[in-house]
Amino acid sequence: MSFDDGAEALVLGCRPGAEKLAATTWIEWLLTGDEAVRRQAQPNLARGSWQLGRWSWHGTALLQWVPPRAWFSVNAFYDVSGDHRLTQWYVNFQRPMHRTALGFDTFDLVLDLVIAPDLARWDWKDEGEYDHGRRLGVVSEADHRAVEKAREEAVAMIEGRVGPFATEARWRDWHSEPDWPTPALPDDVLALVSIE
């Protein structure tokens, strides 16, 4: 669901049941927890032997802030039970999001920054996988230079309490409404997409 599509950022929401497309290796890893499947994802990408599959979001509600042409998105995750509290912030490093006839598309570059709800601390996640992706060519040198700049931008946003991290942005208070429609993909979605 798109909540704002302004000059500062595109703001998207997601809650359990919303459909998306993702790499089938990632989906299999989520379903099985098999780390060998997860480790196979990047070699598959490097060889071009991967496919998209349908996935239904579950477990949390999500609010995503994506600045134009940015190499990252800021994601706020909420517990959908009880008080709908903010459980964590997450900066996902990715190629700039672009519009398609079906919605929005991007390419995850593996590296992430996990941030406490109160912004008191943050930890880098998947740096080893990111380095492996660079060695395999999944993350190009141009991607890497853009991600290095984006890392600095993201940390500056946290430290400066700007964008969705600003107190006045009121992201901590957001919650999805139960009567909002659950986004669904067209039945023939896999025939409509092409992998670049």
Image (cartoon, helix red, strand yellow):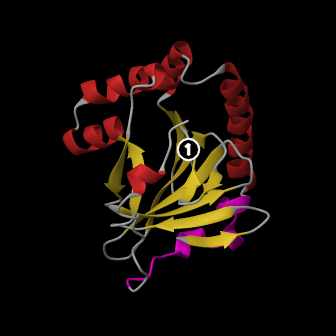
Instruction: Residue 121: say if magenta.
Output: no
Residue underneath mark 1: 92
Q: Position of residue 26 (x, y in %)?
A: 35, 38
Q: Is residue 118 visible?
A: no
Q: Position of residue 63 (x, y in %)?
A: 53, 64
Q: Is residue 126 left or right of residue 158?
A: left
* Residue 106, quarter of picture: top right
When the figure is inspected, residue 176 is found, relative to residue 43, above or below; the finding is below
Residue at screen point 48% across, 17% down? 132
Residue at screen point 62% across, 65% down? 11
* Residue 171, quarter of picture: bottom right
What segment carries the magenta color?
Answer: 162-178
Q: Position of residue 105 (x, y in %)?
A: 56, 50
Residue found at the far top of this picture: 135
Q: Of 105 and 60, which appears nearest the observer? A: 105
Q: Which structural element holds mark 1?
A: strand
Residue at screen point 47% across, 76% down? 175
**Label 1 Cα neighbours within 10 Å, binned few <14 / some 14-19 / many ≥20:** many
Q: Is residue 9 visible?
A: yes
> What kind of residue is marked 1?
Asn
Q: Of 67 and 55, which appears nearest the observer? A: 55
Residue at screen point 32% across, 60% down? 58
Q: Of 12 and 154, which appears nearest the observer? A: 12
* Residue 181, quarter of picture: bottom left
Q: Quadrant of the C terminus?
A: top right
Q: Is residue 112 left or right of residue 65?
A: left
When the figure is inspected, residue 27 is found, relative to residue 178, above or below; the finding is above
Q: Position of residue 89 (x, y in %)?
A: 53, 54
Residue found at the far bottom of this picture: 179
When the figure is inspected, residue 128 is found, relative to residue 64, above or below; the finding is above
Q: Of 63 and 4, which appears nearest the observer? A: 4
Instruction: Residue 165: say if magenta.
Output: yes
